[in-house]
Every structure is written in structure tokens, then in C-alpha cells.
Image (spheres, rainbow, N blue to C red):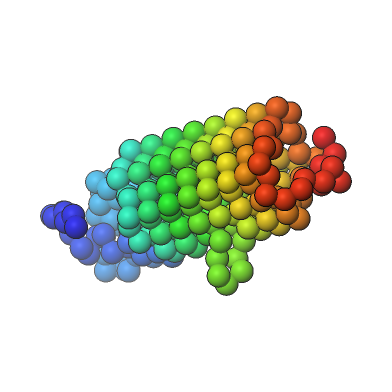
Amino acid sequence: RRAFLIDRSPEYFEPILNYLHRGQLIVNDSINLLGVLEEARFFVAIKNSQPPEDHSPVSQKELGLNFSGADLSCLDLRYIHFKMANLSRCNLAHANLCCSNLERAHLSASVLDCANIQGMLCSNAEGASLKLCNFEDPSGLKANLEGVNLKGVDMEGSQMTGINLRVATLKNAKLKNCNLRGATLAGTDLENCDLCGCDLQEANLRGSNMKGAIFEEMLTVLYMSQSVR
């Protein structure tokens, strides 16, 4: 186990921690807003490096977590608010991201092998490694990656029953041996995608681009009625 001693004020860090958990910045009247702002800058949690001249409360729009290149592997990150966060080149292998808010987050070139990422929603995961990931939730929550840039991702062996990949870009992606039963792939760009050994039973492939896609050793028969391109 790894431990880090960070000698900072817990009073100023508490609002930041609450923001990560709830996605809403709440600061008590007794706390100096400039102290919270400086604390956020220390943890690279605010994009804008200029202090507000009017001392107005820090809004959610100013927050943009930057964890680029960080090692977050094996961490319990459930329900953490990563909206618009920069997680590019992060190591998130074996992390638990169940129900985390990844709306408009950037995960390009990140490693998420064996991660638990139900409900995942991001804008860019180009070149990321998502091998053996679990996108399935026992409660029935379906993972949502609609419109996400997944060019060149490696998702080999991942469990993705019922996942929503509508109009997503999976050009040159590796999806070997993935469970895609009941997945929504309508309008998805699957050009040159490796789908060898995939289970596509009842998957919706209507309007998808399958130019150059590889379908060897399929577990179930792929009917032409599932796709019109």
C-alpha cells in the first residue's frame, strides 16, 4: 500500500473534496474563498490561473480537474465527479469507476485495463487501453458511450452487454472476444475494427460503417438485417 503526506489545510480542502463527491461547490460563510481558490490551484484543480478580482464565489465552470499522467490504479473512485476532467495518459488499471461522472472527460491514451466502469460517459478516449473491463452493472444500469471518440482503443475481452455505443467512433479499434450482446451500435464507425470472437447477439448495427471490419470466429451469426451499411 502507498501512503502520501500532504501538508495542506484541511479546512480549505474540504469544499474541494465535497465537489469531487457531489459535483457542486459549497463553501461555508466562515471559510475564505481565496483560501479555497489557492488550495484548488495547488492540487491543479482549477484551469484559470488568475485570481478573481471581485472575490466572487468560484463557479463550477471554473473547475477542470487535471490528472494527466497520474497513477490512479487500483483506487476506489466510485461516484467521484470527473466532469470535464483531463485524465489523459492516466493509469486507471483495476480502478473502480462505477457511477463516476465522466461527462466530457478526456481519457485519451489512458490505461483502464480490468477497470470497473459502469455508467461511463466521456468525450475522448482515443488510443486508450480498456482490456478486460467490466461495463456491466448488476442493477441493470447500461454503460453510455454514445458519440465517444474511441479510435484505436483496445477493449479486448471486455464485458459490454447492452452498452450504448451509438454514433461512436471505433475506427481501428480492437474488440476481440468482447461481449456485445444487445449493444447499441447504430451509426457507429467500425471501420477496420477487429471484432473477432465477439458475441453480437441482438446487437443493433443499423447504419454502422463496417468497411474493413474483421468478423472471424464469431460466437453468434451476424444477420445482415442487423446492419444496412
Q: Is residue 226 left or right of residue 139?
A: right
Image coordinates of residue 175 in percent, x first then y, are: 58, 41
Of 166 and 83, the residue lying toward us: 166
Q: Residue at x 16, y 56 (%)?
A: 3
Considering every residue shown, the one lying at the far bottom of the view is: 139
Image coordinates of residue 31 in percent, x first then y, are: 26, 64
Whether residue 165 is visible here, answered yes or no, is no
Image coordinates of residue 49 in percent, x first then y, are: 33, 38
Give the vertical position of 15 relative to 220 (above or below). below
Give the vertical position of 117 relative to 130 (above or below). below
Q: Is residue 70 left or right of residue 97?
A: left
The quadrant in which the N terminus is found is: bottom left
Of 26 and 16, the residue lying toward us: 16
Q: Residue at x 77, y 45 (%)?
A: 222
Q: Residue at x 66, y 41 (%)?
A: 217
Of 17 and 121, the residue lying toward us: 121
Whether residue 89 is visible here, answered yes or no, is yes
Image coordinates of residue 56 in percent, x first then y, are: 39, 53
Q: Residue at x 73, y 54 (%)?
A: 201
- Write down the quadrant of residue 28 in the picture: bottom left
The quadrant in which the C terminus is found is: top right
- Write down the quadrant of residue 71 in the picture: top left
